Image: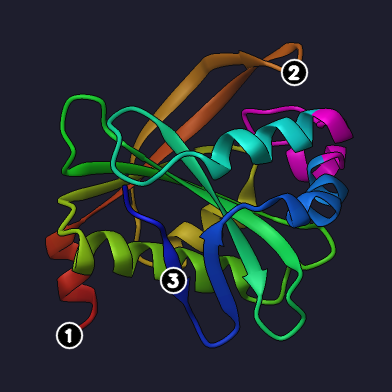
Amino acid sequence: METLNLITPRLNIRHLVSTDLPDFYIYRSNPEVTKYQGFDVMTMEQSDAFIKTNSEKHYGKAGEWVQYAIENKETGKLIGDCAIKLDQYDLRIAEIGITISHLEQKKGYAKEALFTLLTFLFDTKNIHRVVEIVDVENTASINLLKSISFRQEGHFIENIFFKGKWGSEFQYAMLKREWDKRKI
């Protein structure tokens, strides 16, 4: 089992721990933060259970989402979380997701965390393909993906029913060779 610990100039991407609960709950209970997410607002109890469950998960199990903390190195506070799921049938394909606290948005943390996840997946784990699914109304996430050279592959119309209505999603992806070419 692999413990993830990725360090950037401003962030530490690591496993969630029980002391993350107060900061985690602040943003996971905010309807604006969860608006485009596949999950709804969480209670304190749900947040606690989520952290406990994810603290026992490790990178590498096919078909399982593993959520990681995004910690501000300077303050030691949790400012968001990110997730990796390896494809159930092919461990060379990964899907990722990211959530940043409403108190920490528009500071470049999402881009820094995403870039670090991609570096880990492509350069360390030699993943062939990384996918990100995003709500078509989530322009901030769409712009973030485009800024890192993700390519839009699909537009799914009313393909998911969540939060009481049908939603549409875009699928973005990047191949390892595109990542390698981007770095030249």
50 or 30, which is in the foreground?
Answer: 50
Which residue does the numbered mark 3 point to in the structure image?
A: 6
Tell me which label, 1 or 3, sits earlier in the chain.
Answer: 3
What's under tag 1, amino acid-wise? Ile
Residue 73, percent across and down? 65, 81
The part of the chain drawn in magenta is 29-45
Residue 69, percent across and down? 60, 57
109 or 44, which is in the foreground?
Answer: 44
Q: What crowding class fits label 3: few (fewer than 14 Cα within 10 Å), some (14-19), or many (20 or more)?
A: some
Which residue does the numbered mark 1 point to in the structure image?
A: 184
In this rendering, the answer to whether 95 lies above or below 110 is above
Give residue 163's mark.
2
Tell me which label, 2 or 3, sits earlier in the chain.
Answer: 3
Residue that appears at 79% across and 49% down: 21
What's under tag 2, amino acid-wise? Lys
Tell me which label, 1 or 2, sits earlier in the chain.
Answer: 2
Give me the C-alpha separation between circle 1 and circle 3: 23 Å
Q: Is the magenta region chiefly helix, strand or loop?
A: loop
In this rendering, the answer to whether 140 lies above or below 109 is above
Q: Let me know if residue 83 is in the magenta part.
A: no
Q: Is residue 156 left or right of residue 37?
A: left
> Which quadrant is the C terminus positioned in?
bottom left
146 or 53, which is in the foreground?
Answer: 53
In this rendering, the answer to whether 92 lies above or below 111 is above
Q: Quadrant of residue 135?
A: top right
Q: Say which element carries label 2.
A: loop
* Color theme of the render: rainbow
Q: Let me know if residue 43 is in the magenta part.
A: yes
Residue 117, percent across and down? 40, 62
Give me the C-alpha separation between circle 1 and circle 2: 42 Å
